Amino acid sequence: MINVAIDAVCLDAYPLLSESFENYSFFVFDSLNNVDRENYPVVMLFYEGKLSLSMMDGKRPIYVDVDFSAGQSVYRNENKSVKNELLAKAVGIKSNEASGLKILDATAGFGRDSLLLASFGCQVVMLERSPLMAALLLDGLQRAKNERTLRDTVKRMSLLHTDALGILQVASFPSVMKEGFVFSPDVIYLDPMFPGTNKSAQVKKDMRILRCALGEEMDGEELICRAMASGVKRVVVKRPRKGAVLGGGKPSFQVIGKSARFDVYFP
């Protein structure tokens, strides 16, 4: 993990940022003028009304946030159908309304896939272990609740700031995931970080900042092994189109797109 600078206002708004920082060195700042960008390459602050992560791109700062009402998320939601969404096919959605299907997104990231699944009517629980990413997701969810077109969708989305590996090894999983929170998923969805092939500047920027803030994820193999042993009905793993299969087992089937594919297992 790298050093992170966090605005004091952000710590007040999202107390989880001051928790679980044993793997980080972080500096609390009141003004960006106080931040040593060389020693603290990632900065968390409110930028244009959104909680954002920032890093330097040459001599200029770039920012990333979770905004479910803009960009790619809006386009996918407005044009979604089971026919054109490979993820929908992979998790087992049969029509444009999937009411009752319960999905555990064990590697939530920016939450875009969770939003898409919830827009089909799925109940989605997102797990995110990074306090930085979890705070961005919470901020995005809170703002989305005020958007008329998103209000019903985000009601079907829940976030737990926790490590999926810890959840998946609990003896009582998949019926009880966390004290006071009961959820029995039909599907576990895994999207371990991999080098993107999408050439849009926005995706590149998102992934650059995410990798800088979180480092490389090295536990994809362990995640799928625990998911397969969890007792859940279906496990879906997103992979690069030509990437190696995780876990060593042969998928039951695959849904293949131009740059990515979904490996589907029935444990």
Image (cartoon, rainbow, N blue to C red):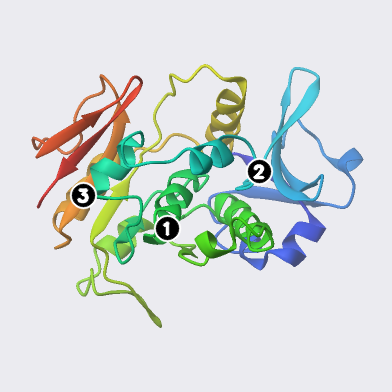
Q: The disc labelled 1 sits on which kind of residue?
A: Leu
Considering depth in this image, is 82 or 201 the residue closer to the camera?
82
Left or right: 250 as drawn, with respect to 244: left
Observer able to see residue 1: no
Q: Return the disc, 3 or 2, that comes first in the chain's sequence.
A: 2
Q: What element carries label 2?
A: loop
User: Position of 249 compared to 227: left or right?
Assistant: left
Q: Which residue in the rendered view is the most extreme toward the bottom?
A: 180
**Badge nearest the viewer, 1 or 3:** 3
Using the rendered image of the protein, determine whether residue 163 is visible from the camera's viewpoint. Answer: yes
Neighbourhood count class around disc 2 (C-alpha, 10 Å): few under 14, some 14–19, many 20 upward: many
Q: How far apart are marks 1 and 2 (CA)?
A: 17 Å
Q: Earlier in the sequence, mark 1 or mark 2?
A: 2
Q: Residue at image x 38%, y 41%? A: 81
Per the model, the C-alpha gap separating discs 3 and 2 is 28 Å
Q: Circle 3 is placed at which residue position?
A: 235
The amino acid pointed to by label 3 is Val
Q: Name the residue under label 1.
A: 127
| Total numbered labels placed on residues in the image | 3
Going by the image, does 81 lie left or right of 18? Answer: left
Residue flagged by tag 2: what amino acid is it?
Answer: Asp
Residue 65 - label: 2
Query: For this rendering, which residue is in front, 254 or 188?
Result: 254
Q: Is residue 23 above or below residue 260?
A: below
